[in-house]
Every structure is written in structure tokens, then in C-alpha cells.
């Protein structure tokens, strides 16, 4: 026989309890004061709980962003140039500790909640109960997470090189499914596609692909396309989060998730999450443009281009015969030698003196170290010298 825990009924608060009412105090006023105090306390607790849930939501978004950045850093992506892996790992640990502390506090407040006539008949918790063992994590293409292990051995990439190759292979095979999902306008169709291609769409590589697609669309000016893709991305994120909270396979909670967002309360929270995600994509696109602009090669002024002899290599290059220009462009010393031998010796010497004065030609201490300079490309390449 299943036992039931009746302990929560031990903490019932009755506002019209006469036991603590002084004989000289008007009972009606006393009851109203106690009721008002209780309502104010419950509002405060509700506000604190909501604030902690919102903070956990923000930290959850940051956690996913850190995990994405770590994956990009470890695979040698763009993030490796401006993110520190140790700092990200430390921040990830701090975020998870903060989330756990808030969840513990919310759980404590719920367990010690005082029951009264106003909330005894209300739903205290909202849970989704799923019967059966559920799907296996191996149902997802390549496993749910990189490095996931199963009874048959490791599933997913075990090294950075393997991770990059695995992602590329995944995109090659499933790109059409991913693009089709990104372009899905009706949310009901998203449910249908998750039912048909859940093993692909709920894979971590799929979410990475969609995130990068959102960023690329925003940077290319396709704002409407980015917003649609962001909404569809959040569908996957919320399904994944719900599966984690229920400790179930993501495919098991697809239908419960779509049933939930039919409730205006959950739908409002979902739309808010979509807008937050869009704002982050827009901010990241701006930052990315700044980073790309900073990496653009700076055009040198004439003064900065001047060679050791005070001549501008650009101007000197334009005065050279075509045969010499082609030799310098291809950095072919043999071709340059042929071009010089075909000229009048005086003219050849004049051009070579100008090349040395401008830095187009570098004359080193030994003749064997002479070579064509790359000043036009802000570098110097030493090649075999002229005979």
C-alpha cells in the first residue's frame, strides 16, 4: 500500500483563529489585519520567487552561451581568438552554483509554505508525468552530447579534431533538414518536423548550426529570416531544457512542450525568451562586425610606405616595365633576371636602384641572400639572388 505524506497539512494558517485574539481587540479588525499581513507576505514571497526564476533564466541562457563558446574555442573557431578557456570554465561553474543556490532557496520556500483558505485548492506544482521508460539517448543522431558514452563504448567525438570533423559531417548529411526547419513559419509545423526529424534537430550540432545561421543572417541584413530562425531555435532550447528538468530524453517531451505553450502564461514566457535571444544575436552581430573591421588590413599612408632610400614602393612599381612587374608580383627572381637581361644595362641599373631605395628589392650582406621584397604586402620574402 502506498503511503501518503500528510505533513504539509501541519502548517495550515487560519486567519480567523480566535486563540490569539485579545478580548479587548475587535475581532473583525484583527482578522482583517492578519489577512492583509498574510496577503502581503505571500506577495513578497511570490515576487522573490519570480525574481529568482528570472535570474535563473538569464543564467541558463548564459550557461548555454558559455557551453557554445567553449565548444567553439576547443574546436579552434573564431571564439578561440578572443575568449579564454579557463575563464569560461570558471564562469560556467559560478553560473551553475548560483542557479543551484536559487533552486534550493525556492524549494525551501515551497516546502515551508503556509497553507490557508486561499491556496489550499490551488495547484502548488505543475509537473508533466510521462509513463514508460522513454526513448534512449542513442536515438539522437550520434548521441545527445559530444563524448556521450553508452554500453557499446564512446559515442560522439573524443578530440577537438574529431569534434570539428563530426560537426562538418553532420552538416553535410543533414543541412537540408536544418534549413527546412529554420524556414518553418507555423509553430505547429515545427512540432511536425520535430516528430519526423527529432533525432537530427535535437542534436547539439543542430543547435550550433542554427545559432550560427541566426548570426550570419543578422550580419547579412536578413532580419526577418533571423527572427524566424531565432524562434525555431528557442523551440529546440526549451524542449532540451524541459527534458533536463524532467530527466527524460528530449524526444519524450516534444508533445508536452507544445501542449504547455498553448497556455497563455507559458506562451508569454516563451515569447519573452525569443525576444531575449534575438537581442543577443543582434548585439553579437554588432560586436562581430567590430572585430572583423579591426582585422581588416590597414592601408598605409605614403609616409609609412617609404623605403630605405626614401622612395614609395607603389610609385616605383608603377614605373617598372611590365616584365619586371610580373616578376615582382610572382616573386620570381629568375623571371626578374630574364627581364633585366633584356634591357639596356643602364636602364636595368636605374630600375634596380629605385627598387632598392623603395624596398621592393632587398640587398642583404651576402649576394646569395638577395631577394624580392613584399613591401606591397607589408612583408619581406628573401629569394635566390641575381647571378
Image (cartoon, helix red, strand yellow):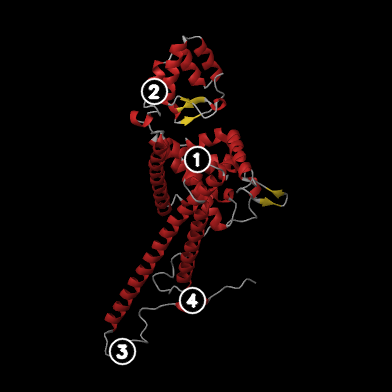
Tell me, yes or no, whether the two marked residues, 1 and 2, touch with CB atoms within 8 Å: no
Q: Classify mark 3: helix, strand or loop.
A: loop
Q: Which of 85 and 119 is in front in this view?
A: 85
| Of pointers 1 and 2, the one earlier in the residue sequence | 1
Residue at (56%, 74%) from the top-left corner? Answer: 5
Q: Nearer the viewer, residue 384 or 58?
A: 384
Is disc 2 surrounded by few (<14), some (14 to 19) or many (20+) residues within 10 Å? Answer: some
Q: In this rendering, is residue 16 above or below 60?
A: below
Is disc 4 surrounded by few (<14), some (14 to 19) or many (20+) residues within 10 Å? Answer: few
| Of pointers 4 and 2, the one earlier in the residue sequence | 4
Residue at (45%, 19%) from the top-left corner? Answer: 352
Residue carrying label 2 = 314
**Disc 4 to disc 1, C-alpha distance:** 49 Å
Residue carrying label 4 = 9
Is disc 3 surrounded by few (<14), some (14 to 19) or many (20+) residues within 10 Å? Answer: few
Q: Nearer the viewer, residue 8 or 72?
A: 72
Is disc 1 surrounded by few (<14), some (14 to 19) or many (20+) residues within 10 Å? Answer: many
Tell me, yes or no, whether the two marked residues, 4 and 1, touch with CB atoms within 8 Å: no
Residue carrying label 1 = 210
Q: Nearer the viewer, residue 106 or 383?
A: 383
Q: Classify mark 1: helix, strand or loop.
A: helix
**Which is closer to the viewer, label 3 or label 2?**
2
Residue 384, visible in the rendered structure: yes
**Disc 3 to disc 2, C-alpha distance:** 100 Å
**Disc 4 to disc 2, C-alpha distance:** 88 Å
Find residue 22 and name its label.
3
**Disc 3 to disc 1, C-alpha distance:** 67 Å
Amino acid at each position: 500500500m502506498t503511503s501518503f505524506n500528510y505533513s504539509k497539512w501541519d502548517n495550515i494558517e487560519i486567519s480567523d483563529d480566535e486563540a490569539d485574539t485579545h478580548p479587548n481587540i475587535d475581532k473583525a479588525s484583527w482578522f482583517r489585519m492578519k489577512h492583509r499581513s498574510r496577503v502581503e507576505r505571500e506577495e513578497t514571497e511570490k515576487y522573490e520567487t519570480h525574481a529568482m526564476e528570472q535570474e535563473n533564466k538569464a543564467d541558463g541562457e548564459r550557461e548555454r552561451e558559455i557551453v557554445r563558446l567553449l565548444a567553439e574555442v576547443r574546436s579552434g573557431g573564431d571564439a578561440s581568438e578572443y575568449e579564454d578557456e579557463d575563464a569560461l570554465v570558471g564562469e560556467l561553474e559560478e553560473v551553475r552554483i548560483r542557479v543551484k543556490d536559487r533552486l534550493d532557496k525556492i524549494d525551501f520556500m515551497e516546502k515551508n509554505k503556509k497553507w490557508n483558505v486561499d491556496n489550499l485548492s490551488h495547484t502548488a506544482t505543475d509537473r508533466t508525468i510521462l509513463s514508460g521508460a522513454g526513448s534512449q539517448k542513442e536515438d539522437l543522431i550520434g548521441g545527445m552530447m559530444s563524448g556521450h558514452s553508452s554500453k557499446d563504448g564512446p559515442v560522439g567525438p573524443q578530440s577537438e579534431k574529431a569534434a570539428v570533423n563530426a560537426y562538418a559531417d553532420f552538416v553535410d548529411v543533414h543541412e537540408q533538414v536544418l534549413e527546412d526547419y529554420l524556414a518553418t513559419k507555423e509553430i505547429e509545423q515545427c512540432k511536425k518536423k520535430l516528430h519526423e526529424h527529432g533525432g537530427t534537430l535535437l542534436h547539439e550540432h543542430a543547435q550550433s548550426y542554427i545559432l550560427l545561421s541566426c548570426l550570419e543572417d543578422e550580419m547579412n541584413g536578413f532580419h526577418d529570416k533571423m527572427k524566424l530562425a531565432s524562434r525555431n531555435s528557442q523551440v529546440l532550447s526549451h524542449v532540451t531544457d524541459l527534458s533536463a528538468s524532467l530527466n527524460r530524453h528530449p524526444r519524450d517531451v516534444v508533445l508536452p512542450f507544445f501542449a504547455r505553450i498553448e497556455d497563455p502564461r507559458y506562451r508569454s514566457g516563451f515569447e519573452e525568451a525569443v525576444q531575449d535571444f534575438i537581442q543577443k544575436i543582434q548585439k553579437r552581430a554588432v560586436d562581430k562586425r567590430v572585430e572583423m573591421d579591426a582585422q581588416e588590413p590597414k592601408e598605409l599612408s605614403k609616409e609609412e610606405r617609404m623605403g630605405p632610400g626614401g622612395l614609395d614602393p607603389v610609385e616605383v612599381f608603377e614605373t617598372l616595365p611590365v616584365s619586371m612587374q610580373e616578376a615582382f608580383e610572382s616573386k620570381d627572381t629568375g623571371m626578374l633576371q630574364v627581364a633585366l637581361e633584356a634591357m639596356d644595362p643602364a636602364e636595368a641599373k636605374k630600375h634596380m636602384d629605385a627598387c632598392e631605395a623603395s624596398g621592393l628589392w632587398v640587398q642583404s650582406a651576402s649576394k646569395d641572400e638577395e631577394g624580392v621584397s613584399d613591401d606591397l604586402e607589408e612583408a619581406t620574402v628573401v629569394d635566390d639572388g641575381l647571378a
